[in-house]
């Protein structure tokens, strides 16, 4: 996954940001100019809104079994068709989207917190602490993510938090690294010396003065982290190791779709949930790309 | 540089040890413990039988001793016996390894080849339609879940068109000879390789392209051109050569990704590889096998990272220990 | 049978291993109750003019650890019983036995069974040889008993072996077996005979090559086993029954752990058949047939496959003295029984490949064919209301502060099951009972109490699995006897229902010890009646007994109990010239 993250946006240089370029105004403007990113953001917002707001408006309950309507291809009544139990797929996709996005958001949130904490501590204190923590990061990078996630979920059970934590476990490292790098360079700067001179404590310096400097890369990593989280959780669910029925995430819907698609040709079962994953991940990647550009104006974009 | 390399190599050792400890600890902390793989280990009825088995698997020793015993075993080639079948873990894993290696190897080869061709061409034809389209596709490829891709491919090529088989490595009924056997094998591998390569092709292409663009913008390229060298030589000879180092680095990093991605691909296509063995063993709680595969995979990741580091430490955003 | 993802009978502890005997191991029952024989291409009678030779291809979903049934608790090893290992006796549809490797069935009339019922004489047919050419003798029989009883060995023998006190080889063909108690299951012995000449001692370990790939007398020989990939069976050139048999040159058993992949492969024509189709699979094959796929489905008329049960926990968390707060109320159990729309499950999910079943003992000796109550949600609601379960604001009923909210668990990974599980969930929602689905791998459910198995620990509310298809009901009845309730003192217990009833216990004992067939049937029927009235467990449907195979495979006979998976059938299989 780390490979994918770093590949989606060629590695941002872990260097200091000139304070001037960091102004919110400047960042936003550059971001908005990056068309695909803006479109991506809009798409994400739209999808999020849809999964939250639309379900009550659709006539169908995602869990309502209605055997008379089973296995129908997409139509005016059932925009995405129905499944073997007659449940409306559009409703299920929206429902699944809520779950998928919640898991992703929670996982990313969690990994952000951990990543920032670890990176800040490592970068700020340096020395032995840094070494130790970076060893930890190394291990995190070296453990085969999917394998351990599968193992964890199989052993502990497929509940919301186990899955969230399992997924989060493998995405905090990038954040930690970047935050640490940011701290390492920023802490040498003059204004830090000055602040310390007037007696500010470590925590204050670390949080109030240095942390904001790392917002840029952190936000980028977060955005890309969402993409990774969704893909990891979907893979997990696709292997049948995710949430219990009738709850389903998009990956879980794909798991249920295997038989209908391959053996019975019910293509709609596979197309829509997968397309949703694709759309969100793509949008997130674009946004991440755009944010990357926005925070690093020096790099000439190709 | 050499001392840096040596240092990195040495650093890999405690890393591996750390990983092994974590892995071992993880598996010990499971509900039911290592004996939960009841079935195969025949841990039914009598308490004596259970006690006997505990002794045989060394489960009554203190934890650190179990770990050391296990670690000693690993290093001397004894990876324990599968709880499920009683067969040596090494044997079980080795049986499944070739399939995964075949799949991963082919995917790697395909990815590198395609990435080079498309990436270089896109860089050379910068800002043309080809460039935009290929970049767009690469970007899309990164976002696409491989299992969705696989499912859709299966729908089109296996269900609808019936051109390709939906699973397995070879036709079971007829034992094809010679060329026919090759074709048969190829038929069965086309889709899995395509699916597994998806992400690595996409990311490698982007890297090749951006790397080439970087290089092509350099002065010495312009100089070479100015000197009258044919474009081809300039691009391929000078350009590619210099661009290839970072590319090789990223390519090396792609190997573990492919290995892990094989879990999904092997599952969709019913291939008897290590990835699928892992999932099966997880369900059976066959810890020795699980530990074995995890270790192999970790060693692979660490080795790949190490290699990439050594090849081009600067580009690879790894931790450099100052 | 292995508990893990076992389709036909998910099973409990090995105590009941006896079950998995040929006599009644309805491996894959799949087919509707009505006799429906589709596509007549060369199925059953005639057609011995088919081309000889060729290799059949079978997909195996559950790869076992070892292939010798005596050393395996997994269903995959039963494959060996279809091709390699042959039994002394075969079971007839009514549950009675007839001789196969045996010369005759020992009874009291022919002197095979002594008057006190303790000594049984087994005689082998003459001229039977192992596939390596060695003759099958009574020494092998005696050896088998020794291995089964050796405490240092890894054998998982049928429980009947435990009653054997001593054996005596009278001559090459005859073995006298003396039991410690009268054992009505004496014909269940020797479903697998071990070749003495292949072993060093009776303490056979699980890694013994014979445990892995056993030698047998059957039409095929285990030639090779590439784990995770393929098991190769070759023709037994020295097959004792008939020099013409088997017709096939060999069989390639391809290991395909994903049931769905195996099924799709079968529909696509990659495999001739699959070891372990389930009811849901047949339904899908039926649909594919309609689309033009080549497949044959044969059903065994009047045969009922394994029943899918809802196991109710009658105890509160494993303590049999405290009744379950919700399920302990008979009204709730009745409501559940009436609230399930069984017909919808059979028609829509199983596509008709299932029948209604309402009795405990539904197969073999002492079977009754009761029907369950019809789908009547109104009656269900009424029963609940009258018992004091009032509808709460969230749609879930309450009584005395207790919410009717239950965990509903089965073995994960089976798509068809997941479907009707959700139908049941919906049905229960309609009458005000909340079911929370929490599927787990089969280890979690069926592991012993010490290992933390949910059922054995009493840590469940409702669990669903298949069970009960046996020609002889003794062990099945035992499953619900109080003495087998798992507890601290009895960790190996397997009465997961945690239910106890004195009358039932008495009847169960009678059935286990009486040799007189009529008395036994009486006792069995009475016990059944009590069980059904109390709704100890609730049956959902009985799988239809049917099998499916590719029409290129001809001469496929279906045995009543084991379908196509018997040596009698497999020896005859041939590939048509097309």
Image: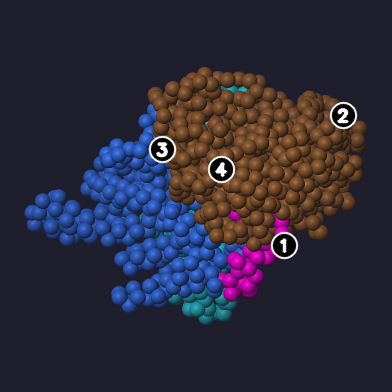
Chain colours: A cyan, B blue, C brown
Relative to B316, is C196 above or below?
A: above
Inter-mark Cα distance, 4 to 2 = 55 Å
Q: Specify the principal SS of the magenta part.
A: helix
Give the residue drawn at x 44%, y 52%: B96
Please name whichever residue, C348 or C451, is drawn nearer the observer in this view of the structure: C451
Q: Is residue A136 visible?
A: no
Host chain of mark 1 = B
Residue C483: image location, x then y, percent: 83, 50
Residue C313: image location, x then y, percent: 80, 45
In the picture, which quadrant includes the C terminus of chain B? bottom left
**Helix, strand or loop for disc 4:** loop
Host chain of mark 2 = C
**Helix, strand or loop for disc 2:** helix
Which of the two discs, 4 and 2, sits closer to the camera?
4
- Magenta residues, start to end: B39-67
Please name whichever residue, A253 or A120, is drawn nearer the observer in this view of the structure: A253
Query: Farthest residue in the left direction?
Result: B228
Inter-mark Cα distance, 1 to 3 = 45 Å
Q: Are marks 3 and 2 on the same chain?
A: no
Host chain of mark 4 = C
Inter-mark Cα distance, 3 to 2 = 58 Å
Give the residue drawn at x 84%, y 27%: C379
Q: From the image, tell me which residue sits under label 4.
A: C85
Q: From the image, tell me which residue sits under label 3.
A: B172
Question: Horizontal placement of B303 versus A172: left or right?
Answer: left
* Residue C532 part of the magenta-drawn span: no
Q: From the image, tell me which residue sits under label 2.
A: C382
Host chain of mark 3 = B
Which of the two discs, 3 and 2, sits closer to the camera?
3
In the picture, which quadrant includes the N terminus of chain B? bottom left
């Amino acid at each position: 996954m780390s490979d994918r993250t770093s590949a989606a946006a060629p590695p941002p240089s872990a260097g200091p940001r000139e304070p001037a370029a960091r102004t919110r105004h400047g960042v936003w403007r550059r971001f908005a100019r990056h068309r695909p990113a803006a479109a991506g953001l809009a798409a994400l917002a739209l999808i999020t809104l849809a999964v939250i707001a639309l379900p009550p408006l659709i006539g169908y309950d995602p869990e309502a079994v209605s055997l008379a309507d089973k296995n129908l291809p997409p139509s005016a009544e059932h925009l995405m068709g129905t499944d073997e139990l007659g449940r409306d797929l559009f409703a299920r996709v929206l429902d699944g989207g809520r779950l998928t996005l919640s898991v992703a958001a929670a996982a990313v949130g969690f990994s952000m917190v951990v990543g920032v904490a670890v990176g800040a501590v490592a970068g700020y204190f340096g020395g032995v602490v840094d070494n130790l923590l970076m060893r930890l990061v190394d291990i995190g990078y070296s453990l085969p993510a999917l394998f351990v996630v599968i193992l964890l979920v199989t052993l502990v059970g497929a509940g919301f938090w186990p899955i969230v934590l399992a997924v989060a476990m493998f995405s905090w490292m990038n954040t930690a690294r970047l935050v640490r790098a940011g701290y390492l360079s920023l802490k040498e700067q003059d204004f830090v010396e000055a602040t310390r001179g007037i007696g500010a404590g470590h925590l204050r310096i670390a949080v109030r003065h240095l942390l904001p400097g790392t917002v840029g890369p952190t936000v980028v990593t977060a955005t890309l982290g969402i993409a990774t989280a969704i893909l990891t959780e979907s893979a997990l669910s696709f292997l049948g190791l995710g949430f219990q029925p009738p709850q389903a995430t998009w990956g879980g819907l794909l798991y249920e779709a295997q038989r209908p698609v391959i053996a019975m040709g019910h293509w709609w079962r596979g197309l829509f949930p997968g397309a949703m994953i694709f759309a969100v991940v793509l949008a997130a990647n674009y946004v991440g790309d755009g944010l990357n550009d926005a925070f690093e104006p020096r790099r000439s974009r190709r | 540089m050499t001392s840096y390399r040596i240092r990195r190599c040495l650093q890999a050792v405690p890393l591996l040890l750390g990983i092994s400890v974590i892995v071992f600890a993880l598996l010990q902390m499971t509900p039911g413990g290592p004996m939960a793989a009841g079935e195969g280990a025949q841990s039914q009825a009598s308490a004596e039988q259970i006690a006997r088995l505990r002794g045989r698997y060394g489960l009554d020793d203190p934890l650190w001793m179990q770990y050391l015993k296990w670690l000693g075993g690993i290093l001397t080639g004894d990876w324990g016996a599968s709880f499920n079948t009683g067969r040596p873990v090494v044997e079980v894993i080795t049986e499944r390894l070739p399939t995964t290696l075949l799949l991963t190897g082919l995917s790697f080869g395909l990815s590198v080849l395609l990435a080079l061709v498309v990436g270089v061409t896109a860089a050379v034809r910068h800002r043309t339609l080809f460039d935009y389209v290929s970049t767009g596709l690469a970007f899309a490829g990164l976002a696409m879940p491989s299992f969705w891709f696989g499912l859709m491919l299966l729908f089109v090529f296996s269900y609808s068109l019936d051109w390709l088989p939906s699973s397995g490595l070879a036709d079971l009924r007829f034992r094809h000879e010679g060329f026919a056997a090759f074709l048969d094998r190829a038929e069965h591998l086309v889709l899995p390789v395509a699916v597994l390569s998806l992400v690595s092709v996409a990311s490698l292409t982007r890297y090749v392209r951006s790397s080439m663009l970087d290089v092509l913008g350099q002065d010495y390229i312009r100089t070479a051109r100015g000197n009258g060298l044919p474009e081809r030589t300039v691009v391929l000879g000078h350009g590619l050569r210099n661009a290839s180092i970072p590319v090789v680095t990223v390519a090396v990093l792609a190997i573990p990704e492919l290995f892990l991605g094989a879990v999904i691909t092997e599952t969709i296509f019913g291939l008897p590889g290590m990835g699928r063995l892992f999932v099966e063993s997880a369900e059976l709680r066959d810890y020795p096998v699980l530990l074995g595969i995890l270790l192999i995979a970790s060693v692979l990741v660490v080795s790949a990272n190490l290699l990439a580091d050594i090849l081009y430490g600067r580009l690879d955003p790894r931790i450099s220990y100052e | 049978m292995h508990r893990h993802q076992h389709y036909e009978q998910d099973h409990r502890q090995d105590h009941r291993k006896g079950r998995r005997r040929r006599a009644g191991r309805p491996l894959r029952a799949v087919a509707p109750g009505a006799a429906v024989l589709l596509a007549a291409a060369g199925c059953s009678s005639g057609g011995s003019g088919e081309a000889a030779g060729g290799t059949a291809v079978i997909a195996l979903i559950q790869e076992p650890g070892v292939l010798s049934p005596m050393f395996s608790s997994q269903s995959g090893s039963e494959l060996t019983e279809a091709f390699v290992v042959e039994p002394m006796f075969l079971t007839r549809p009514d549950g009675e036995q007839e001789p196969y490797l045996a010369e005759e069935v020992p009874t009291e009339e022919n002197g095979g069974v002594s008057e006190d019922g303790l000594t049984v004489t087994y005689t082998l047919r003459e001229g039977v040889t192992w596939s390596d050419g060695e003759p099958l003798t009574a020494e092998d029989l005696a050896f088998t008993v020794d291995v089964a009883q050796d405490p240092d060995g890894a054998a998982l023998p049928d429980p009947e072996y435990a009653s054997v006190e001593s054996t005596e080889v009278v001559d090459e063909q005859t073995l006298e077996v003396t039991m410690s108690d009268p054992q009505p299951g004496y014909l269940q012995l020797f479903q697998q005979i071990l070749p003495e000449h292949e072993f060093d001692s009776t303490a056979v370990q699980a890694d013994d090559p014979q445990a892995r790939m056993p030698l047998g007398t059957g039409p095929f020989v285990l030639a090779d086993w590439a784990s995770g990939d393929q098991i190769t069976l070759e023709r037994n050139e020295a097959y004792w029954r008939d020099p013409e048999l088997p017709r096939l040159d060999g069989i390639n058993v391809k290991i395909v752990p994903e049931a769905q992949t195996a099924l799709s492969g079968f529909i696509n024509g990659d495999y001739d058949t699959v070891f372990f189709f389930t009811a849901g699979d047949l339904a899908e094959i039926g649909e594919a047939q309609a689309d033009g796929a080549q497949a044959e489905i044969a059903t065994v008329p009047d045969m009922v496959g394994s029943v899918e049960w809802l196991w109710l926990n009658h105890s509160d968390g494993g303590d049999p003295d405290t009744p379950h707060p919700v399920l302990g109320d008979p009204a709730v159990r009745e409501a559940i029984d009436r609230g399930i729309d069984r017909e919808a499950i059979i028609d829509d999910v199983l596509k008709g490949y299932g029948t209604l079943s309402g009795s405990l003992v539904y197969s073999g000796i002492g079977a009754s064919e009761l029907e369950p109550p019809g789908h009547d949600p109104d009656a269900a609601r009424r029963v609940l209301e009258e018992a004091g379960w009032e509808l709460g604001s969230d749609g879930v009923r309450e009584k005395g502060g207790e919410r009717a909210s239950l965990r509903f668990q089965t073995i994960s990974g089976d798509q068809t099951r997941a479907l009707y599980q959700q139908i049941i969930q919906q049905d229960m929602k309609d009458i005000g009972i909340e079911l929370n689905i929490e599927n787990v791998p089969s280890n979690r459910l069926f592991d012993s109490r010490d290992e933390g198995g949910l059922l054995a620990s009493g840590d469940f509310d409702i669990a669903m699995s298949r069970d009960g298809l046996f020609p002889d009901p003794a062990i099945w009845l035992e499953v619900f006897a109080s003495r087998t309730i798992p507890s601290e003192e009895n960790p190996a217990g397997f009465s997961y229902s945690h239910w106890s009833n004195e009358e039932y216990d008495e009847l169960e004992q009678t059935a286990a010890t009486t040799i007189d067939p009529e008395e036994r049937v009486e006792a069995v029927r009475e016990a059944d009646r009590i069980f059904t009235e109390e709704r100890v467990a609730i049956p959902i449907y009985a799988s239809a007994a049917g099998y499916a195979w590719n029409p290129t495979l001809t001469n496929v006979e279906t045995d009543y109990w084991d379908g196509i998976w018997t040596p009698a059938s497999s020896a005859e299989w041939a590939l048509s010239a097309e």
